[in-house]
Structures are given as structure tokens and as C-alpha cells.
Amino acid sequence: MSSTNDLPPPAQHNTVNNDDDEDDEWDKRIRRTGCFKENEELLICHADTNDWRKCLRELTAFKQCMQANKS
């Protein structure tokens, strides 16, 4: 009988391929606009507050960036 000490740490025997470090198509498109930072701040605000109305500063900054970059 083997003990649990014989098993590799969970990260080494995880069979799920986790590509969270790679940009998905959405991230790639946003990066090309030059407004990735503003988009991230907006998304974080919404995730933290769960209310777009509380993120008007971030939304305005993202909108201005997109307009400035003609994206």
C-alpha cells in the first residue's frame, strides 16, 4: 500500500490544461486597442462592486481611451 507522500504535489498531477496565463481572443483584441489597462480597471471595478454605476470613472477612462485610439 502506498502512502499519500508518494504522490506528486497536486499541480504536478493535475490533468486539466489550465491556459489562464495565455491571452484569449478578447484579451488580444483589447491589447491591440492600446486600452488594456483601462479595460482591466473597469472589469476589476465591476467584479468588486457588481454594479456598473459604481464604475463610471473607469468606464469613462476606457471610453476616452478607445475614442483617442479610434478603436
Image: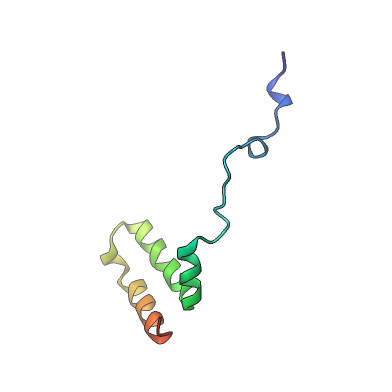
Could you say which quadrant of the image residue 68 lies in? Answer: bottom left
How many numbered discs?
Answer: 0
Residue 20 coordinates in the image, percent (x, y): 54, 53
Q: Farthest residue in the left direction?
A: 53
Q: Is residue 53 above or below residue 48?
A: below
Residue 58 coordinates in the image, percent (x, y): 36, 72
Q: Is residue 16 left or right of residue 37?
A: right
Q: Quadrant of the C terminus?
A: bottom left
Residue drawn where x is 47% and y is 70% of the image: 29
Of the pair 65 and 54, the residue shown nearer to us = 65
Q: Is residue 23 left or right of residue 60?
A: right
Q: Is residue 51 left or right of residue 1?
A: left
Residue drawn where x is 33% and y is 58% of the image: 49
Which color mode does the image show? rainbow
Q: Quadrant of the N terminus?
A: top right
Residue 70 coordinates in the image, percent (x, y): 40, 85
Could you say which quadrant of the image residue 4 lies in? Answer: top right
Residue drawn where x is 50% and y is 75% of the image: 32
Q: Farthest residue in the top direction?
A: 1
Residue drawn where x is 33% and y is 77% of the image: 60
Could you say which quadrant of the image residue 3 lies in? Answer: top right
